Image: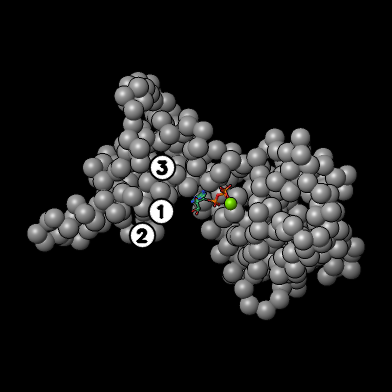
Amino acid sequence: MDYSINEKARDALSRLAAMPGMAQVKEQVEQMVQYRRIAELRKQNRLKAQPQTNHMVFLGNPGTGKSTAARLIGEAFAEIGLLKRQNGSVPFVEISHGIITDSLVGASEKKVASKFKEARGGVLFIDEAYAFIGKAEHRHDDKVIATMVQLIEDMRDEIVVIAAGYPKNMAEFLSFNPGLASRFPTTIHFPDYDVPDLIRIAQQMLLEQEYQPSSDYLEALASVLWIEKSRPDFGNARTVRNHVERSIRRQAIRVSKLQQPSRKDLASLTAQDLVASPHGLADSEREALIKIIREAQSRLLKLDLNAIISAN
Ligand SMILES: Nc1ncnc2c1ncn2[C@@H]1O[C@H](COP(=O)(O)OP(=O)(O)OP(=O)(O)O)[C@@H](O)[C@H]1O
Ligand SMILES: [Mg+2]
């Protein structure tokens, strides 16, 4: 008897595979799936199969795809039996310090426990996990973490716990309680996207919504992203989504002025639909932008952005 991955799991895995970037998470998930497949075959051949701990730490800046990847992993794992599936859809429960904290004695621990229960058969995603320990000068009560550590261990067959946050803070979080680090055997890095990947992401988002970006739109977007990438509040794929949504709204206004817009008019996005930045660019940034665009020309060739644009 063969052990195969069913269609739903394959669908979740191929949606993950189709997302630009995120090389490490794709490789790691593939390894976990293959391990599971072999463990199943070993069982069928009456060989011992070592159970696996699937909890993970996701390290990355905002908008690098951590939540999205965690959801798809939950769906795929439930389908292949890595999670004990209940009925219906796969739970994805997100917790953060803000929604758990309660000033009543013992209430925070109770909330944590009920969230773990809710996530049975799916993923419990702890966003900005380090917020649970507080700042170095003011540490929070250890009881919530202790409850978590216990539940992570007790429910390891039923849920995958994914703790996410920035690299530096997460190191502090994991060393806070001696039980924590050993319960998260896998760490996955979500690096910031480079501009060609951000452009691929924009293309995917637009294609999904049946818009056709022109090459000058993509070039203009790339230039804006070069600038925005260096700002501290840059939101990676989330920034791209915001650009895409603003462009779609501006395109609608432009097209509404046409007498009888054609199908092509309705689908096309051009550079004039791009809203450069919500706050506009300051003069110094505009100068820097021109300089960067010039410098980028040669880099773009190397990074095959031109190929992406002309394939469009
Ligand atoms: N590789 C990708 N391809 C397409 N869309 C992406 C990709 N990565 C992220 N996105 C989109 O970008 C947005 C932000 O992604 P997500 O919420 O997963 O990021 P995050 O790392 O969890 O961010 P945060 O740390 O702020 O919670 C979502 O709309 C998501 O669909
Ligand atoms: Mg998130």
Q: Which secondary structure lies at badge 1?
A: helix
Choose top left, top right, bottom left or bottom right for residue 69: bottom right
Sequence-wise first label, 2 or 3: 3
As measured in the structure, the alpha-carbon distance from the residue carrying label 2 to the one carrying label 3 is: 15 Å
Whether residue 242 is visible here, answered yes or no, is: yes
Amino acid at pointer 2: Gln
Vertical comparison of 303 with 7: above or below: above
Disc 2 crowd, CA 10 A, few/some/many (<14, 14-19, 20+): few
Choose top left, top right, bottom left or bottom right for residue 113: bottom right
Q: Which quarter shows the N terminus? A: bottom right
Amino acid at pointer 3: Ile
Q: Who's the residue at 62% across and 41% down the image? A: 60
Answer with left or right where residue 185 lies relative to residue 214: right
Q: Who's the residue at 56% across and 64% down the image? A: 11
- Residue at numbered disc 3: 199
Out of 214 and 184, give the one closest to the viewer: 184
Q: Residue furthest bottom?
A: 87
Out of 174 and 11, give the one closest to the viewer: 174
- Residue at numbered disc 1: 205
Vertical comparison of 1 with 186: above or below: below
- Residue at numbered disc 2: 209
User: Residue 34 appears at what percent x and percent y?
Assistant: 72, 57
